[in-house]
Amino acid sequence: MSTQLETQDTKSVAHRIERASNRPVLVPAVDINESNEEIVLTADMAGIDESSIDITLENDVLTIEGHMPTSDFAGYNLGLKEFSDGDYRRVFTLATDVDRDRISANVKNGVLRLTLPKAEPAKAKKIAVKAG
């Protein structure tokens, strides 16, 4: 069984993206698992919740974007910062048809799970021919 998603290099598509901010773009680690019925994508997007994720599928290109809120602590001075603020972005090209009406996504504890059910293959249909 071959992987039905092809990763696009984020840097190569970055020049085509008009960004409204100068925040860094973070590339989340992703696992892709496939069965005969579906493709399941799991992405590590720390600091993200359901209101800050945007997932689009257009022309077989799957784009996952997430906006991580800035970690400000009012009344505190920054002592050490090892976790960088930024926006997540991953782009994939689908190599198989998916059932767009049954795609589902959920996020829990900063882990996105995106389920892409495979579409039924086109079935042969007998077409009746009428005289006249």
Image (spheres, rainbow, N blue to C red):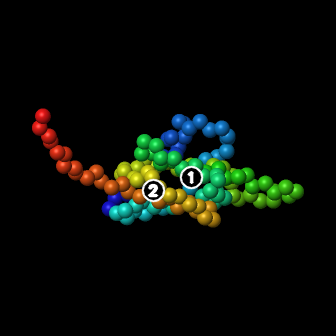
Residue 6 locus on image (x, y percent)? 41, 51
Tally the marks: 2
> Percent from the top left, x then y, of residue 81?
74, 58
Is residue 2 visible in the rendered structure shown here?
yes
Q: Is residue 38 found left or right of 114 in the rendered image?
A: left
Q: Looking at the rendering, which quadrant does residue 47 occupy?
A: bottom right
x%, y% of residue 54? 58, 49
Residue positioned 37% across, 62% down in the render: 37
Q: Residue 8: image x %, image y %? A: 46, 47
Would you identify the image quadrant in which residue 35 lies?
Answer: bottom left
Label at residue 27: 1
Label 1: how many Cα within 10 Å (few below 14, some 14–19, many 20+): some
Q: Which residue is mark 2?
A: 102
Which quarter of the figure is the N terminus placed in? Answer: bottom left
Q: Tag 1's secondary structure?
A: loop
Instruction: From the viewer's side, name the closer residue of 47 and 116.
Output: 116
Reply above or below: 110 against 7. below
How packed is label 2: few (under 14 Cα within 10 Å), some, or many (20 or more)? few
Q: Residue at x 62, y 56 (%)?
A: 50
Which mark sits nearer the N-terminus, 2 or 1?
A: 1
- Among all residues in the image, which is located at the extreme left? 131
Contact between labelled residues 1 and 2, with CB atoms less than 8 Å apart: no
Marks 2/1: CA distance? 26 Å
**Label ID, residue 89:** none
Say if 69 sits above or below 131 in the image: below
Q: Quadrant of the C terminus?
A: top left
- Amino acid type, callout 1: Val
- Where is 33 relative to 60, above or below? below
> Depth check: 20 or 60 in front?
60
